[in-house]
Amino acid sequence: MLLSMAITGCAEREHKASQSVKIATFNVSMEATNYLPRGTSPTPDSASLLMRELASGENAQIATVAAIVQQVRPDILLLNEFDYTADPERAIGLFQENYLARPQADNDAIHYPYFYTAPVNTGVLFPFDLNGDGEVTAPADTYGFGHYPGQYGMVLLSRYPIDKSAVRSFQHFKWMDMPGALIPQTAGGAAYYSASAWAEFRLSSKSHWDIPVNVNGRTLHLLASHPTPPVFDGPEDRNGKRNHDEVRLWLDYIGGSASYLYDDQGGKGGLDAQASFVIVGDLNSSAVEGDGRKDAISALVTHPRILDPNPVSAGAAEARPDNRYSPHHTAGWGMRADYVLPSAELTVTDSGVFWPGKNEAHRSWVESRAVSSDHRLVWVDVAW
């Protein structure tokens, strides 16, 4: 009887997969600051902490992250803030073997036979002194804020094959090469960065990836990124302007205005006008709230090539009942920051944010960053 039920359950899941594909993004907070004693700052030596916790199989925060993934069961999943380690394939393998492959909180195990990851700009030392202290040191003098290379990295997990030979990454694209770039300036109107620094500055704080996935014979482009938070700066608004232009890159990429773009593989231009895609990631930007610039994200969620499901959750609504935007929040600190945006020719059959309400099951899984993450898993079911 149990075997029959298991086979039936598998058949139901396979039937659902044949009808629609569940795509998700989740900032999982799996970087060093979550594995250090409270009040301790990361150092370059902290780069090994994630590998230690993955190998142990006993980290409660990672186990809860895995429980949320097993509960929602996305077919394709972008993980933000999963450190890019010295041995990334082993790190992803340990995460699957020691956490996803083990039933968490009575969930069924889950497995992703395909994955993609690559280096990011965080923690990579810049060739110039950016903060003017006379030294080139992390985290201030890096291409993207980080205490060590790979901090706040990204991983794409998939049930469907990934065409790695056709992946495009834009890690090295220079900010100055974007027409109309929002150049950081001092309060007096002078350039914030020196001419030599600006000539080397990369746009992506982590990276931008175009990852083609073969979904039952159709190619779906996963456009993944994690722009810098638009705060933690001064009147020059260097982070706010960078966040805006990181989001804008996808606007140009899908909108036919990307002739200036060049990828790390030497290719030029944007996405084909007929291609199906889903933009995924913690974009650290909201069209209606927060301190960031709203032009780029507003244009993205209303773009004619995009369907914005604008998912909701009971937990988000309860967290800030006096905020009319709160049902759409995806971060515990109160903003919509994480997005799954399908292209318009796809059909959205369902969507949601894993943020249980006070009287719903598994509420304890989202209590804090220490328990799981300060972000919530966001998912969308799409079909052709």
Image (cartoon, helix red, strand yellow):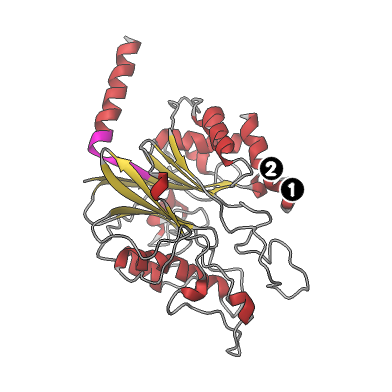
Q: Report whether 309 appears left or right of 58.
A: left
The three-letter amino acid code for the residue at tag 2 is Ser
- Identify the residue at horizontal 31%, vertical 53% (top origin): 277
The residue that label 2 is drawn on is 48
- Identify the residue at horizontal 68%, vertical 42% (top origin): 49
Percent from the top left, x then y, of residue 92? 54, 37
Q: Is residue 154 magenta?
A: no
Residue stretch rendered in magenta on the structure:
17-23
Q: Residue furthest right?
A: 134
Percent from the top left, x then y, of residue 20? 26, 40
| Image: 195 above or below 77 | below
Quadrant for residue 213, please give it: top left
Quadrant for residue 310, please give it: bottom left
Alpha-carbon span between mark 2 and mark 1: 7 Å
Judging depth in this view, the residue of 362 and 227 nearest the camera is: 227
Quadrant for residue 168, please give it: bottom left
The residue that label 1 is drawn on is 45
